[in-house]
Amino acid sequence: MRRNSTALSAERETIIVGVVLVLILAFGLMLRVLAFAQSEVPQYPHGDAAKYFTYAYNLKNFGVYGMGNLEVFPANSDPAAVRSVVPPDAIVTPGLPVFLSLFLGGEHTTEQRDAILLTQVLLSVVTILLAFFAFLPVGKTLALGVALLTACTPHLVTMNLHFLTEPLFTFLLLLSVFTLSRARPENRAVYFLALGAVLGLATLT
C-alpha cells in the first residue's frame, strides 16, 4: 500500500510539474509573439545586424561570403560582377549569416524578415525548454524557476526582433548545457562528441 501511495504521489508530482512547465512555455511564447506583433521592425536591418544580413544576402544570392561596403545589390545582379567588388573575408563569424541565408533568396522581402524573426521566436521558446531540462537533475523546483526566468527575462524576449547572434547563440549555449547534463559514464563518449559539435557551432556564431 505504501509503495502504491508513493508511486501515486510521484505521478501526481510529475503531472503538476508538466502542467506548470506548459504554462511557462505558453507564457514565454505569448511574450515573444506579442513583442513581434507590436514592434515596428524595419525590413532592412541597421547597425551590427546589417553586417550579418549583408553577409547572408551575398552568400545566398552571389555565392560570396563577404560584406563589401554594406551595399545591398539587386538580387538579379551578375554574381561575377558582385564578387569583383565584394571580396571574400572572415571579419564576421559565419554561424548567423549561414542561418539567415536559409531564409533569403532573391530580393529581400518583409515575408523573409518575418520568417527569420518568427523562427528566432520558436528557437527562444525551445531555449526555455532546454533550460528546464538542463537543470532538472538539480531539482524540479529549481528547473521550473530557471525556465520561468528564461521565459520572462526582457532581453531574451526582445532580442528575437533583430538579426543578431544572441537568439541563435543562446539556443546553442543552452543546448550544450543540456547535452552536458545528459552525459553518463556509460554514454559519455557520445554525449561529449555531441557537446563538442554544439559548442563548435556556438563558437562559430
Image (cartoon, rainbow, N blue to C red):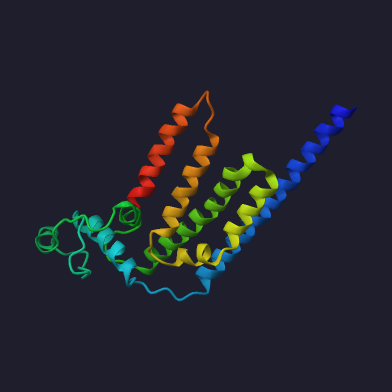
Residue found at the far top of this picture: 186
Rendered view: 38 above or below 169: below
Q: Nearer the viewer, residue 9 or 105?
A: 9
Residue at image position (32%, 67%) is 48
Question: Residue at the spot x=10%, y=62% of the render?
Answer: 81
Residue 149 is drawn in which quadrant? bottom right
Classify 36 as above or below 125: below
Image quarter for residue 195? top left
Left or right position of 44 against 67: right
Residue 52: image location, x then y, percent:
30, 62
Identify the residue at horizontal 51%, vertical 56% (top origin). 124
The spot of residue 128 in percent (x, y) is 57, 53
Position in image of residue 199 (x %, y %):
40, 43
| Quadrant occupied by the N terminus | top right
Q: Residue at x 25, y 56 (%)?
A: 60
Against 64, residue 159 (above or below) is below
Q: Position of residue 158 (x, y in %)?
A: 49, 67
Determine whether 30 is above or below 138 in the image. Answer: below
Q: Would residue 189 appear left or right of 71 to someone viewing this image? A: right
Residue 162 found in image quarter: bottom left
Between residue 136 and residue 162, name the one nearer to us. Answer: 136
Is residue 76 toward the left or the right of residue 166 in the image? Answer: left
